[in-house]
């Protein structure tokens, strides 16, 4: 199954942007990749219930 992406624009503090740019230079990852990894880690660790809620919303949407 291929993954679908949605592009969003966000504002972040300059310090976070500098840290992301540092990751880009030192780790060889794009800023998008670094943000995606960090967001996935956050959602897995800090907001595990969001996955269950997403499944519920998809099921509700499909039933309409």
Image: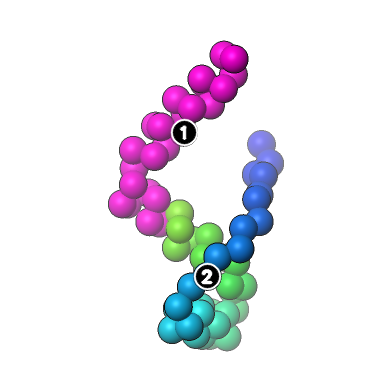
Q: Which mark is residue 17?
A: none
Please tell me whether residue 50 is drawn above or below residue 12 in the rendered image. above
Q: The residue tagged with tag 2: helix, strand or loop? A: loop
- Residue 49 in percent (x, y) is at 34, 38
- Quadrant containing the C terminus is top right
Depth check, mark 2 against mark 1: the one in front is 2
Name which residue lies at 67% across and 44% down: 4
Principal secondary structure, stretch drawn in magenta: helix
Determine the CA span between mark 2 and mark 1.
25 Å
At label 1, counting other C-alpha atoms closer than 10 Å, the crowd grade (few under 14, some 14-19, many 20 or more) is: few
Left or right of 2 on screen, residue 20: left
Instruction: Identify the residue at the far left of this view.
Output: 46
- Residue 39 in percent (x, y) is at 45, 58
Q: The residue tagged with tag 1: helix, strand or loop? A: helix
- Residue linked to disc 1: 54
- Residue 28 in percent (x, y) is at 59, 78
Residue 19 visible in the picture: no
Classify residue 10 by image quadrant: bottom right
- Residue linked to disc 2: 11
Name which residue lies at 57% across and 22% down: 61
- Quadrant containing the N terminus is top right
Left or right of 28 on screen, residue 45: left
Left or right of 47 on screen, residue 59: right
- Residue 55 in percent (x, y) is at 47, 28
Magenta range = 41-64
């Amino acid at each position: 199954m291929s993954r679908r992406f949605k592009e969003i624009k966000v504002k972040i503090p300059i310090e976070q942007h500098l840290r992301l740019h540092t990751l880009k230079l030192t780790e060889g990852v794009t800023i998008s990749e670094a943000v995606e990894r960090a967001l996935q880690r956050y959602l897995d660790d800090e907001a595990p219930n969001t996955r269950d809620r997403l499944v519920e919303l998809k099921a509700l949407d499909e039933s309409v």
